[in-house]
Image: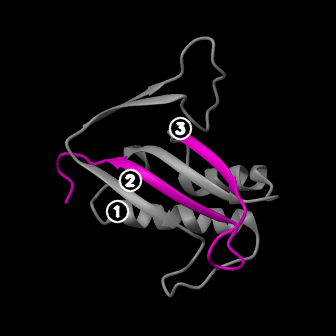
């Protein structure tokens, strides 16, 4: 398994994400949209920062199920409710995710199927050879 992060000369470099990711893997883990909900399915907060942190914790929980972690994630897709301040989500994400600059796409959407949800996060991970 290998993940090579690309930040070509001539493109903006940011410690929060990579411009591209080269993946060499036999096994991929596709993590469906995770929201800021707890183990009982309840939304844990009404603000974007706390929902973002919980959604990322949920992504990490799925990764841990197969002995993987944030370093194995090749791509995150973050869906934000229209009008949400992305900066508050970015700021709080580092507290949970750490400095793992994967490829990231952030999209604003009109809304989610569940009222009150402000963020949903999908992930694509490259599993290590010894993962369950």
Image mark for residue 101: 3
- The residue shown at (32%, 54%) is 29
Q: Is residue 80 above or below residue 107?
A: below
Are the residues at dot 2 and dot 1 in contact (C-beta closer than 8 Å)? yes
Image mark for residue 69: 2
Which mark is first along the chain, 1 or 2? 1
Q: Could you give the CA–CA distance between mark 3 and mark 1, rounded to whole angstroms?
A: 19 Å
The magenta stretch is: 104-132
Report helix, strand or loop for mark 1.
Answer: helix
- The residue shown at (59%, 85%) is 42
- Few, some or many C-alpha atoms within 10 Å of disc 3 (few <14, some 14-19, many ≥20)? many
**93 left or right of 59?**
right
- Few, some or many C-alpha atoms within 10 Å of disc 1 (few <14, some 14-19, many ≥20)? some
As rendered, which of 15 and 10 lies closer to the eye? 10
Q: Is residue 38 above or below residue 33?
A: below
Q: Is residue 49 above or below residue 27?
A: below
- The residue shown at (17%, 50%) is 130
Q: Position of residue 66 (x, y in %)?
A: 27, 61
């Amino acid at each position: 398994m290998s993940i090579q992060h690309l930040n070509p000369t001539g493109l903006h470099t940011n410690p929060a994400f990579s411009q591209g990711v080269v993946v060499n893997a036999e096994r991929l883990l596709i993590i469906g949209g995770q929201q800021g909900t707890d183990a009982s399915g309840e939304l844990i907060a009404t603000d974007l920062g706390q929902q973002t942190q919980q959604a990322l914790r949920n992504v990490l929980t799925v990764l841990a199920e197969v002995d993987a972690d944030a370093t194995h994630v090749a791509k995150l897709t973050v869906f934000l409710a229209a009008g949400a301040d992305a900066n508050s989500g970015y700021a709080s994400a580092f507290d949970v995710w750490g400095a793992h600059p994967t490829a990231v796409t952030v999209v604003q959407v009109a809304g989610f199927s569940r009222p009150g949800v402000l963020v949903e996060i999908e992930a694509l991970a490259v599993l290590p050879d010894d993962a369950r």
